């Protein structure tokens, strides 16, 4: 079951592409955009992550954006370098965090869904959207609108 808006976001620690620990609770006081995507090196995932890096799609002084997938730290590192991706990519190889947020793909359980969760400055889930079709790019407008409502 997908995590519900208004609930406390489960804290987690995952490794970044640089093999450094990234902990959600360390970003309390900022709005955190968690962008789940199925796999590095896939066309829609590449398009989205590059868009975030080159266009002001999810910008904000108090906003932290991270991508999450089951790919390894090493895959993330190579992919980030190859496409000049600016935000951190978090490795969730066993899908533990994906499962805790209800983001494991129901039809393809070895990947996550393409989904967005915004965790507000107090650590509560403020927004959730799951792409119906995993191959389609996510709709940025509701995500941007949700971020604008957060103080």
Image (cartoon, rainbow, N blue to C red):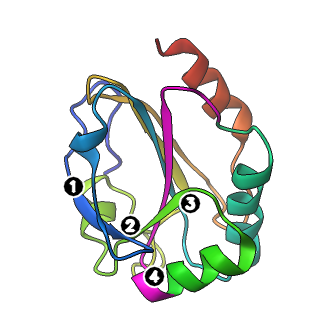
The x, y position of residue 131, in whole percent, is 61, 53
Sequence-wise, the earlier of marks 4 and 1 is 1
Q: Categorize mark 1 by other alpha carbons within 10 Å: few (<14), some (14-19), many (20+).
A: some
Query: Magenta stretch: residue 47 in it?
Result: no
Mark 4–mark 3 distance (CA, rounded to whole Å): 14 Å
Q: CA distance from mark 4 to mark 2?
A: 14 Å
- Residue beneath disc 1: 12
User: Mark 1 against mark 3, which lies toward the viewer?
Assistant: 1
Q: Which callout, 4 or 3, points to the residue nearer the camera? A: 4
**Which one is earlier in the sequence, the residue at label 2 or at label 3?**
2
Location of residue 42 in the rendering, given as x and y in whole percent from the top left corner = 69, 80
Give the extent of the magenta segment: 59-74
Residue named by callout 4:
71
- Residue for point 65% across, 22% down: 145
Upstream in the sequence, badge 1 or badge 3?
1
User: Pointer 2: what residue?
Assistant: 104
Residue in the foreground of this view, choosing between 146 and 2? 146
Residue at which label 3 appears = 114
């Amino acid at each position: 079951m997908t995590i519900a808006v208004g609930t406390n976001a489960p804290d987690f620690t995952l490794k970044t592409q640089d093999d450094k620990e990234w902990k959600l609770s360390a970003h309390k006081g900022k709005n955190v955009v968690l962008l789940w995507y199925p796999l590095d090196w896939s066309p829609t995932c590449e398009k989205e992550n590059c868009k975030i890096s080159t266009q002001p799609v999810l910008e904000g002084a108090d906003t932290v954006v991270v991508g999450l997938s089951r790919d390894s730290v090493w895959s993330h590192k190579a992919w980030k370098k190859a496409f000049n991706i600016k935000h951190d990519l978090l490795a969730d190889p066993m899908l533990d965090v994906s499962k805790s947020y209800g983001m494991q793909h129901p039809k393809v359980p070895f990947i996550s869904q393409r989904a967005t969760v915004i965790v507000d400055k107090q650590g509560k889930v403020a927004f959730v959207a799951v792409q119906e079709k995993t191959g389609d790019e996510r709709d940025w407008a509701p995500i941007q609108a949700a971020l604008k409502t957060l103080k």
